[in-house]
Each structure stands twice: as C-alpha cells, then as structure tokens.
Image (spheres, rainbow, N blue to C red):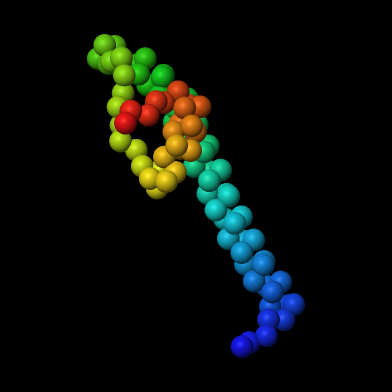
Amino acid sequence: MTQVTRSTRRARDRTHSGARDIVAQAARRMKRAFDNSLREFPSHLAERRDLDDVIAIFGNVAFGTAAQTDQLARIAGHYGFERIP
C-alpha cells in the first residue's frame, strides 16, 4: 500500500478545493443568467401584443435527478414556478 505524505495530501486537498471553486463559480454564473432571464421575460411579454391572451406558460425542465425533484421544486417556487406532476 502506498503511503500518503502530508504534501501529497495537501496537493490533493488543493485540487478538490479548486474543483469546488470552479463548480461554485459556474453555479453563480448560471444563477445570474437565470435571474436576468426571468427579469427580462415580463418585459418581453409586454412588448409582444400577440401574446396578450397568454395566461400561463408550461415547460418541461430538467435541472437535476429524480431524487432532487423536491429540492428543485422549492427553488423554482422562489421564482414563481409551480410543479405540475
């Protein structure tokens, strides 16, 4: 069995930390893009007179696994979306 030295352990920890940072940065960019899109959406609908009679919008969106459905539904609820089973 290979013995793990402290320096090897520190290097491994830095690598994992760096990967977490990259994932966190990507998540923040996605959240900003999502927020911007949702903020612009009502203006877009208001400009489109041909959409005045639209009362609801339906979409099938998959951001996670089936096991994450409840958590994602709560997050989407903060943006005014409802889960329709």
Residue lying at 38% horizontally and 45% vertically, measured from the top left: 66
Q: Quadrant of residue 3?
A: bottom right
Where's residue 42, x and y in %? 41, 19
Q: Residue at x 73, y 77 (%)?
A: 7
Residue 61, given in percent of the width and then of the height, sits at: 34, 38
Q: Nearer the viewer, residue 45 or 83?
A: 83
Task: Residue at 45%, 23% (x, y): give it.
Answer: 80
The one of 18 and 41 positioned closer to us in this rendering: 18
> In the rendered image, is residue 36 in sight?
no
Asked whether residue 6 is in view, the answer is: yes
48 left or right of 34?
Answer: left
Q: Is residue 27 above or below residue 42?
A: below
Quadrant placement of the C terminus: top left
Residue 11: quarter of image: bottom right
Residue 67 placed where, x, y %? 42, 46
The quadrant holding residue 4 is bottom right
Above or below: residue 20 compared with residue 35: below
Q: In the rendered view of the protein, which quadrant contains the N terminus?
A: bottom right
Q: Residue 14 location, x and y as percent? A: 67, 66
* Image side of residue 47 versus residue 11, left or right: left
Residue appearing at x 41%, y 26% in the figure = 81
Vertical relation: 82 (above or below) 3 = above
Depth check: 47 or 19 in front?
Answer: 19
Q: Residue furthest right?
A: 6
66 versus 76 height, above or below: below
